[in-house]
Amino acid sequence: MKQTCLLMGMPITIEVVEPTVTQDDLDKVFAYFVSVDDTFSTYKATSEISKINRGELLAAQYSENMKSILALSEQTKKDTHGYFDIQRDGIYDPSGIVKGWAVQNAANMLRAWGFRNFYIDAGGDIQLSGNKDGNPWRIGIRNPFNRTEHVKVLALTNRGIATSGTAIRGQHIYNPYNRDTLLIDSVSITVIGPNIYEADRFATAAFAMGKRGIQFIEKLRGFEGYMIDAHARATCTSGFEKYVLHE
């Protein structure tokens, strides 16, 4: 069963290839994404994060999910030497970590219900579990200069994959150490990690690092990356090729 809904300002697709899945199962997962959006959307005046940014909530009033995201964001800031920072000019925008975190939680929901073969794709942040028809899931990396073309097709199972860049949303990521300079050296970086939460948070930080981002991913144990620069030149980590599908 496969279904796509427009939530959190993006298409979210869930596919579960096991025959026991029901529409109710998918509905519960989509409802979870709605609740995440209601809490963390900076575009909704009624969201918890918007209320925090307006100074309407004290720290003691934060929800447990909000406390978790703020703590995880602070940990990611440390893990990335300050290149991941959800606060700018006193305003919180946790979108660089919430999406992967939410997809990971949704995957955990499906696993708790006994499903092992599925994928969840939230605007390009993808968690893959098990297989499809006995083979690893196939995931394409789009050409940021031609969105109708895939530059690589990967074979993945039990991994998360996330891409950060400017091809779709423009200049929405910034370098915390040079906030006013546009990130123009690279246009996209794709990160494969043990799960989508890890892949997503490090992809965002790596893109903020510019050309040095791929070197950062190279040093992370259990991660691989593929970067495309402004001149359409690609650089990949040393173990990336093992995921590339050759036909």
Image: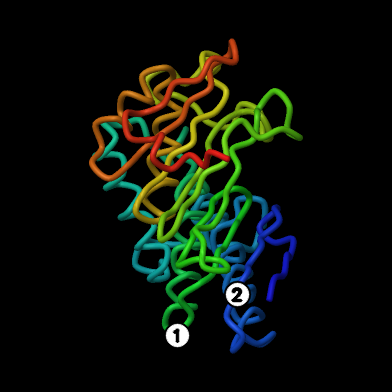
Residue marked by disc 1: 114
Q: Splitting the image into 4 quarters, where does residue 195 fall?
A: bottom left
Furthest residue toward top:
231
Residue 64 percent coordinates (x, y) = 38, 71
Q: Which corner quadrant holds the C terminus?
A: top right
Going by the image, does 140 lie left or right of 135?
Answer: right
Q: Disc count in the image?
A: 2
Q: Residues within 10 Å of mark 2 (few under 14, many from 20)?
A: some
Amino acid carrying label 1: it is: Gly
Q: Callout 1: helix, strand or loop?
A: loop
Q: Quadrant of the N terminus?
A: bottom right
Work out how far the residue at label 2 is from the one at label 1, CA to CA, in angstroms: 12 Å
Q: Amino acid at mark 2?
A: Val
Q: Nearer the viewer, residue 104 or 161?
A: 161
Which residue is identified by label 2?
17
| Residue at image location 32% in from the left, 54% down from the top | 72
Q: Is residue 112 above or below residue 73?
A: below
